[in-house]
Image: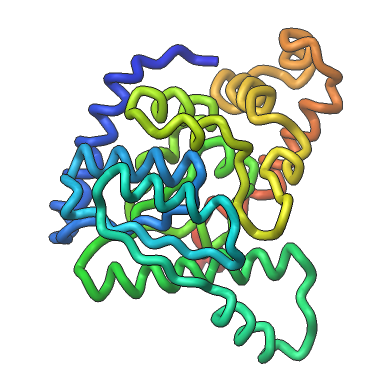
Amino acid sequence: MRKLDIETVVGTGEDFLRKGVAGAGADGVVVGVSGGIDSATAAYLAVRALGKERVLGVIMPYYENGDVDDARLVCESLGIDYRVIGIKPIVDAVVAQLGFQPDRRSLGNIMARARMVLLYAHANQLNRLVLGTSNRSEVLTGYFTKWGDGASDVAPLINLYKTEVWEVARFLGVPGRIIEKKPTAGLWEGQTDEDELGISYRLLDEILWRLVDLKMSRERVAEELGVPVEKVEYVESLVRRSEHKRRLPPGPEF
């Protein structure tokens, strides 16, 4: 993996946020705080850049679990205002109108989009921007919900791989229990990101860095990392199949 100067990364991120908020004529940002590493790191960075008075946290659980406690810890450690809004009634109301029972993945997408509706409602009301929490690993593999957690106005972590977000989090002083917990989108009991992706973030990042940034062949990547070429091909397929999620909807040329 590349070697980053984390202090420079943080300074660049702070400058990016200040300019983005000022350029939009906004009064601050609203961030969905999940209790996970990405949202915590984004929130810590935003407070450094803008001050705690200009950052609002919104915690949006579908069910009560330890993630809510971790999300509260992030907000209270930073001293930011925050609100807890249970999204189960919203999601259940949507499901009731569908005429069918969505499968687990579809239900998870409804949850993610319900959360984004709430974030934008707060942002619009307060003249703020929605702070994105997506990282490069998830964007490249399509591990996000289009128009859900993938939607935002400013995304300071979007060019950092997941393993780099962990480094930034340590530098910023994110609580250790947030850094050490297994990453999860909190969509259902026992769900973890790495189980769904089918690969650890550390190996994923090493493969993505070589495939996407260094433009290495899959065979060379496999040889250098000592993994089966099929594992590299799997990651390559994730990137290829999710291309539509990284682009605005295409239209015909006239």
- Residue at point 24%, 75% (across, down): 125
Q: Position of residue 254 (x, y in %)?
A: 49, 69
Q: Is residue 180 above or below residue 4?
A: below
The residue lying toward the viewer, choosing from 23 and 108, is 108
Q: Kindly tell me whether residue 244 is visible in this rendering.
A: yes
Q: Kindly tell me whether residue 211 is visible in this rendering.
A: no
Q: Position of residue 159 (x, y in %)?
A: 44, 34
Q: Is residue 177 above or below residue 6?
A: below
- Residue at point 46%, 67% (across, down): 116
- Residue at point 34%, 50% (across, down): 75
Q: Is 42 left, or right, of 97 in this rendering?
A: left
Q: Quadrant of residue 105?
A: bottom right
Q: Is residue 248 above or below residue 8?
A: below
The residue lying toward the viewer, choosing from 62 and 105, is 62
The residue lying toward the viewer, choosing from 138 and 180, is 180
- Residue at point 50%, 55% (across, down): 68
Q: Is 69 left, or right, of 81 in this rendering?
A: right
Q: Colour scheme used in the picture?
A: rainbow
Q: Position of residue 81 (x, y in %)?
A: 26, 59
Quadrant of the rendering where the N terminus is positioned:
top right
Q: Position of residue 218 (x, y in %)?
A: 75, 21
